[in-house]
Image (tube, rainbow, N blue to C red):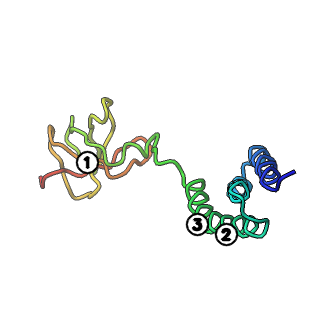
Amino acid sequence: MQAWIIWLIVAAGLGIAELLTLTVDLGLLAVAALAAGLVGAVGLGVGMQFVAFAATAVLTLGIIRPVVRRHLRRPPALRTGAAALIGAEAVVLAEVSKHGGRVRLVGEEWTARPYDSTLVIPEGATVDVFAIDGATALVHPRESP
């Protein structure tokens, strides 16, 4: 049996093991085995095949693996629930002061307080949501009141 066929069998075995474990490492080693198989198919000797396997394994594990791991650990960029409302625009329905008020936020009516408790925001003003405290939006006017 020719050496490049053995490399393809090794690559297939590593690929199947990667599908079962989902570690990324075995998949990168399967790529290295494919590279060694290609070198063998071209007609280069077993020594060059091992060099191709080692070089490809080092490069993929050293460069691609950290990037893939970083992307796997990153939380999704999608914000949901109250966190999705932060930064949204709202319109004041009833004057907002430190004692309370109402705003229309994403089509719903919310209780509101100014983020800066010394402000009084008049009805009809456009505000930005800075935070959500329970069921109350903490808002700040877009323009100075």
Image position of 17 (left or right of 107): right
Residue type pointed to by label 3: Ile
SS type, badge 2 = helix
Residue 92 sits in quarter: top left
Can you give x and y, in whole percent of width and height, for residue 77 in the image? 46, 48
Q: Which residue is mark 3?
A: 63
Identify the residue shown where x is 59% and y is 61%. 64
The local crowd at label 1, few if under 14, some if 14 to 19, many if 20 or more residues have their Cα within 10 Å, is many
The image's mark for residue 128 is 1
Which mark lies nearer to you, 3 or 1? Answer: 3
Q: Which residue is mark 2?
A: 55
Q: CA distance from mark 2 to mark 1?
A: 54 Å
Residue type pointed to by label 2: Ala
In the foreground, 85 or 117? 85
Identify the residue shown where x is 74% and y is 55%. 26
Can you give x and y, in whole percent of width and height, for residue 48 in the image? 73, 68
The image's mark for residue 31 is none
Residue type pointed to by label 1: Asp
**Along the polypeptide, which appears first: circle 2 or circle 1?**
2
